Image (cartoon, rainbow, N blue to C red):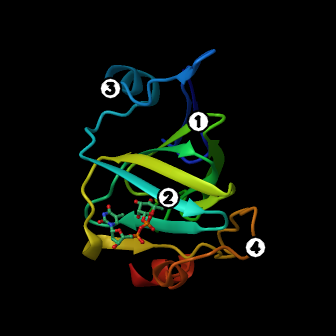
Amino acid sequence: MIVTELRLPGVMLIEPDVFRDPRGFFLETFQAQRYREAAGITLPFVQDNHSRSPRGVLRGLHAQHRYPQGKLVRVARGEVFDVSVDIDPASPYFGVWTGAVLSDDNQRQLWIPPGYAHGFLVLSDVADFEYKCTDYYVPDDEVGLVWDDSAVGIDWPLADPVLSDKDRAWPTLAQIKADR
Ligand SMILES: Cc1cn([C@H]2C[C@H](O)[C@@H](COP(=O)(O)OP(=O)(O)O[C@H]3O[C@@H](C)C(=O)[C@@H](O)[C@H]3O)O2)c(=O)[nH]c1=O
């Protein structure tokens, strides 16, 4: 397993060992001891999620404020561009983003520590997106950042993604800073 820290502290790109043979492939998508030692994931997971989306859907950018969730994310089918952003006005990394392409071909995962905003854009016909979370979903606690804030400048590979009404309405970085 290869683990690389991306430019946001604690955001880890994880490339698990994939065992391929004439039947297909096998990999361990989580193993507590190894992921603790290699990727620094010490918090227990309490919720697993699975979403399916067609090409061009962008989900995000989401976080929870009082109950931040660490997320171990992967793509079971298809391909996505996955992004994390620091939305803490008190952080020296406020407004910094990082991203990676995750797919069922490369079998990469991302560990996104609690606190960062997270989202992804579907690059394949369909994407099955699976992730483990270190805290429960608390809808009233949800906060977000609008996907196309020019002050953040995320290099999304698509200009006109399909968004939910909720995701169209998230604040910009400047609004987040003013509201805190
Ligand atoms: C996230 C979530 C949603 N839901 C419900 C609420 C709603 O009716 C429906 C769809 O919710 P959303 O539109 O928020 O789903 P979605 O946009 O897929 O939300 C997810 O986006 C990615 C980027 C993340 O990082 C996740 O943490 C989560 O916020 O599913 C749950 O029951 N539990 C959950 O944990």
Q: Can residue 71 be seen in this view?
A: no
Query: N-terminal of the two: label 4 or label 3?
Result: 3
Query: N-terminal of the two: label 1 or label 2?
Result: 2
Residue type beneath disc 3: Ala
What secondary structure is marked by label 2? strand
Q: Mark 2 points at which residue?
A: 52
Query: Could you tell me if the residues under marks 4 and 2 are in contact, i.e. CB atoms within 8 Å?
Result: no
Q: Which residue is drawn at 28% across and 72% down?
A: 139
Q: Which of marks 1 and 2 is in front?
A: 2
Q: Viewed as shown, does residue 100 lie left or right of 110?
A: right
What secondary structure is marked by label 4? loop
Q: How far apart are marks 3 and 2 (CA)?
A: 26 Å
Query: Could you tell me if the residues under marks 4 and 3 are in contact, i.e. CB atoms within 8 Å?
Result: no
Q: Distance between the residues labelled 4 and 3?
A: 38 Å
Query: Could you tell me if the residues under marks 1 and 4 are in contact, i.e. CB atoms within 8 Å?
Result: no
What secondary structure is marked by label 1? loop
Q: Name the residue under label 1.
A: 108
Q: Viewed as shown, does residue 125 lie left or right of 85?
A: right
Query: N-terminal of the two: label 1 or label 4?
Result: 1
Q: Residue at x 39, y 73 (%)?
A: 143
Q: Mark 3 points at which residue?
A: 32
Residue type beneath disc 2: Arg
Residue toward you, 130 or 24: 24
Q: Mark 4 Cα within 10 Å, few/some/many (few <14, many 20+)?
A: few
Q: How far apart are marks 1 and 2 (CA)?
A: 18 Å
Q: Does the residue labelled 4 lie within 8 Å of ligand 1?
A: no
| Whole-percent x, y for residue 56 in the image | 67, 67
Q: Is mark 2 within 8 Å of ligand 1?
A: no
- The quadrant the C terminus occupies is bottom left
Residue type beneath disc 4: Ala
Q: Distance between the residues labelled 1 and 4?
A: 24 Å
